[in-house]
Amino acid sequence: MKRLITFIALMLPALAFAQWRVGVNVGATYNHSTINKHYLTDFQWDDRWGVTMGVMGQYDINNWLGVRAELDWTQKNYRLTRQILSDLDYKYVNNYLQLPVMASFSFGGERLRGFCNAGIYGGYWLTSGREGKDFNSSSNKVYEFSEDINFNSERDQRLDFGFVGGLGMEYHFCQRWAAQVEVRYYHSTVSTQKDYMRLSDPRYNSTLGVQAGLWYRF
């Protein structure tokens, strides 16, 4: 009983400070896809910009530590071109639903504070599509296209998991409201392509995000 009373007494200052906050965020992503060319030496996979947006919640345990979770719609795009065939240009758009869960460490003054987020995330590949141009050898003409890509359960790995970290600044511009800007990095540990052929062809996404958020603190 004495230990329980002592523990409660030690936790009272943290419980007195603890508060919830909810918010929204929006920003841009810059995705890099790690793909093995094998023998396709003239193929070039390039990074592409995308967008991200979502809702977020955070429980602040004390003035420097919180637990943060989000539900985000995030794009992880890339581009495919060929060095010896300039008419080929494929721009891929991949939409993911992601749930990052992070510890949030903050530091600084009452109104302007810095913060660092670190944790893990789980995701699900919602949709995929591509647009661009290609060369038709039969007609000897270049044509443009825009199409959705159907998922193949034997080939495509739609579940995603990885690590996430971020650095940012927060400004408390009034009693209940705060604004944030953050640079964030997602490192996927799951290949987007399964081992469905004799030749292993793993493909991984590494995504940099720049986002702004608005918080309401209860």
Image (tube, grey):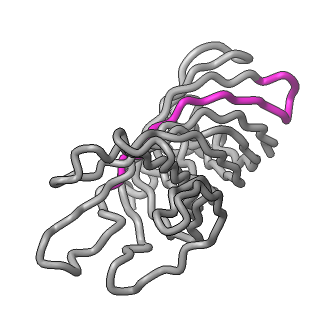
The quadrant where residue 98 appears: bottom right
Q: Say above or below: 28 vs 70.
A: above
Does 121 appear in magenta?
A: no
Asked whether 53 or 103 is in front, the reply is 53
Asked whether 5 or 111 is in front, the reply is 111
Query: Where in the figure is residue 113, as x and y percent of width and height?
Result: 63, 19
The quadrant where residue 60 appears: top right
Residue at the farthest front position: 139
Asked whether 209 or 9 is in front, the reply is 209
- Please, what is the dominant secondary structure of the magenta stretch? strand
The quadrant where residue 127 appears: bottom right
Q: How many numbered circles are shown?
A: 0
Q: Residue at x 48, y 47 (%)?
A: 79
Q: Say above or below: 24 vs 166.
A: below
Q: Which residues are magenta?
A: 172-188
Residue at the farthest left position: 198
Which quarter of the rendered picture does the N terminus lie within?
bottom left
Asked whether 25 or 127 is in front, the reply is 127
On the picture, is 61 further left or further right than 3?
A: right
Q: Residue at x 56, y 67 (%)?
A: 128
On the picture, is 99 further left or further right than 57?
A: left
Does 185 appear in magenta?
A: yes
Query: Where in the figure is residue 38, as x and y percent of width and height?
Result: 16, 54
Q: Say above or below: 210 vs 58.
A: above
Q: Is residue 148 visible?
A: yes
Query: Where in the figure is residue 37, as x and y percent of width and height?
Result: 23, 51
Residue at the farthest bottom position: 153
Q: Residue at x 24, y 62 (%)?
A: 202
Q: Is residue 10 visible?
A: no
Query: Where in the figure is residue 84, as x and y percent of width and height?
Result: 34, 41
On the picture, is 85 further left or further right than 173?
A: left
